[in-house]
Image: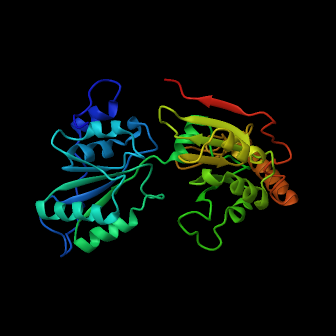
Amino acid sequence: MTGKAQGPTQPVTAAAATHTPPQPSAAAPTSHEPAGRTKVWFVGAGPGAADLLTLRAAAVIAEADVVIWASSLVQAEVLDHAGPGAQIVDSAALPLEDVRALYERALVEDLVVARIHSGDPALWGAVQEQRELCDELGLPHETVPGVSAYSAVAALADRELTVPELAQSVILTRLGGGKTPMPAGEEIAEFARHGTTMAVFLSAARSGQLQAELLDGGYPPDAPVLVAYRATWPDELLVECTVGTLAETVRARKLWKHTLFLVGPALAASGTRSHLYHPGHFHGHRRARPQARRELRAADAAARGRAQAGGGREARGWDKQSAGAGQAEREAGP
């Protein structure tokens, strides 16, 4: 698939046709930069759906001479943005050494390369080693961020991951013991002690270990969990469960890969309000209403007192929230 997509179902494509890709920085080139247009773009393709590409990503792909993508992780429809003369290379079976050969050719032939990665290249994309390779070759490179799976899953679930008084942090991590060693101190159980929202990647194959570590870290068995398989793909599956039923939920559906877990009290929160649009809150564009300001300050003081008295756990509502014994499941439509 190398022709540019047309039609109202692909609004990003129309934007790509009228926007030129981002140009290199205006800063003076360093001595190792070659003349010409040669460049490698590391492009975040998002979690799956092709229309979640950013406008910049679509424009960069449209202008590339070589488009490298992983068929095992990126939807083929993303290639609809490639130009008719672009060389399409599937990297699913290529080691870094074979990708190096493509980068070397780009340097010799003055080519633009779009290296497409699933999700956001900043997370588990093996991009840093490619940047270092480009630096070694003297090949300019730039990165286009993408939509990460954790934010896509939160959108599908219609949930905010940072909720006042319950969770103001999001921990992105993966389970230890897999192919890539985890640094000391980055165990799931250690992160779970914070009791906030967690997004756990690359861990479905060892769901029993994941459940055990979440419990060891302090999440109660009824803490809510959202299990997301191939989010935004046509066969996506979202399942609501609890920490106590996580492993059986995963095993019953044979979800061994392409699965993300969201965990924490924010997934079942309601009845809280942020300061941002409160009439008692002020900022550079709005004054606070005096009575509302006094009420807000009193509410803040009470919230701090509850947090201190409860040591954090009760303030998060662990004793009030329960995802229930049942599980809700939703499969994507056609």
Task: Answer yes or no: is residue 52 visible.
Answer: yes
Q: Where the N terminus falls, by quadrant? A: top left
Q: Which of 220 and 302 is in front in this view?
A: 220
Q: Is residue 284 left or right of residue 324?
A: left
Q: In which quarter of the image is residue 4?
A: top left
Q: Nearer the viewer, residue 297 or 128?
A: 128
Task: Answer yes or no: is residue 273 visible.
Answer: no
Residue 30 drawn above or below residue 86: below
Query: What residue appears at the point 59 percent right and 72 percent down from the top-left corner?
Result: 183
Q: In this view, does 150 lie to the left or right of 47?
A: right
**Percent of width and height locating residue 161:** 63, 46
Query: What residue appears at the point 33 percent right and 66 percent down from the top-left corner?
Result: 131
**Percent of width and height locating residue 270:** 73, 37
In this figure, which colouring scheme has been used for the structure?
rainbow
Q: In this view, does 295 lie to the left or right of 175?
A: right
Q: Is residue 74 left or right of residue 235?
A: left
**Percent of width and height locating residue 309:** 88, 58
Residue 155 drawn above or below residue 136: above
Residue 176 drawn above or below residue 319: below
Total numbered badges shown on the rendered structure: 0
Q: In which quarter of the image is residue 160?
A: top right
Query: What residue appears at the point 44 percent right and 52 percent down from the top-left corner?
Result: 120
Q: In which quarter of the image is residue 239?
A: top right
**Percent of width and height locating residue 294:** 75, 47
